Amino acid sequence: MTEIIVLGAGMVGIGSALALQEKGHAVTVVDRRGPGQETSYGNAGIIQAEAVEPYPLPLDLPSLIDIALGRTNNVAWSLSGMRHWLGPALRYARHSLPRGYRANIVPVWSRMIHRATADHNALITAAGADDLISREGYRKVYRTARGFELAAAAAERYRSEHGVPHQLLDGAALAAAEPGLRQPLAGAVHWTSAWSCRDPGGLVERYAELFLRRGGQIRRGDAMSLQRDGKGWQVTTEDGSVNAERVVVCLGPWSPALLSRFGHRIPMVFKRGYHLHFAVENGPVLPMMDVETGTFLSPMTKGLRVLTGAELNGIKAAPGLRQLQRSTVAAKQLFQLGDKVEDQAWMGTRPCLPGMLPMIGPSPHQPGLWYNFGHGHQGFTLGPTTARILVETMSAS
């Protein structure tokens, strides 16, 4: 009998499998696709050592009006999907109120972020994945002087309160650092402690190969087949049933649907994102977020990845490409893009819990059922870290 089943082969699931394996457990990972083929594939590839505060919902009236009227590309929403996201979003707003957010959420979140690069580094070295990693940081760029001024003040607060390093570049310095820019910008914050990956799905695959070399198993199967089997658990795979004493749910945005079958009601804000790759000869030297247009530009193995902000919608809703169209226009304003590398845009969903912190730990009423999901925008960053927290919690139980 397998001792532990891990459901999900993304960064969080493979990270959990490796951490459990390191403690001597026999682990089988089950996923309907291969490692790193879902949400972990489609992100910006940043291990965000600077992201010491999770994203609160903007509560100032101008920002809310801009979102409501569709005047910002950072957040989009769907009227037809409101039944899925409105309730969880209102809870998210309550947790975004400054007093509770700073007292209860930021301290826990920042401790995890401060561990992230070290936890990744151990796996990068063991997996032989240094060729995928840059440790030179990334830049947030600003088109307006006011935006750059506010960002510089926020960056200094991050330095003084959290010890996060950064460098400020004015327009001239940014133009010198990024010679491919087609238009002048007000400036940039260079977050120097962040790392980037030129193939996020590929990094998860390297970690998965390490897990297999160490004796783990990965099976194709449907997590929704999970059921009780006496005192343990059973899931069906292409190679037959897998049984285990314990199961860990690392399914990101699909976790609430599975857990609802076992009496759990877990509200989640589904923040959808899109990307396309473009050929480019003189693109950004470092990954770059064009903050005021809600656009992220990441140099990848396949080309320049153009990514969008967040779309609030149901997890099964049809694609809405307006944000990606706007982000493509913004990217072309900044760099000379070539042809699209693929015809169809990638689409994925960030699993954001209203309390902003991931759920890590045991089910309160299903023995042997464990959680590790709900990382919001930072599953790629925090997967190995929350895996270690999971193992520490399991060992103490």
Image: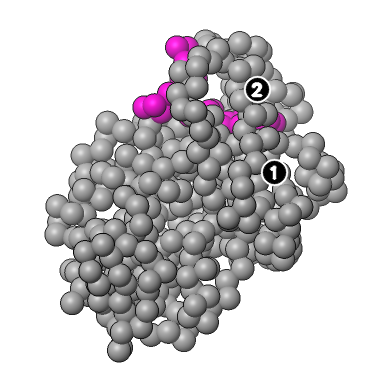
The residue beneath circle 2 is 329
Q: Which mark is residue 64?
A: none
- The amino acid pointed to by label 1 is Val
Q: Residues within 10 Å of mark 1 (few under 14, many from 20)?
A: many
Residue 111 in percent (x, y) is at 47, 57
Q: Residue at x 44, y 38 (%)?
A: 45
* Residue 338 screen position, x and y as percent: 50, 14
Position in image of residue 32 (x %, y %)? 36, 57
With respect to residue 344, does 38 lie above or below? Answer: below
Report whether 312 appears left or right of 140: right
Vertical arrangement, residue 343 with respect to residue 10, above or below: above
Q: Quadrant of residue 248?
A: bottom left
Q: Give the labeled residue for mark 1.
A: 75
Residue drawn at x 27%, y 80% as measured from the top left: 245
Residue type marked 2: Val
Residue 211 magenta: no
> What range of the chain is rendered magenta?
280-304
Q: Quadrant of the N terminus?
A: bottom left
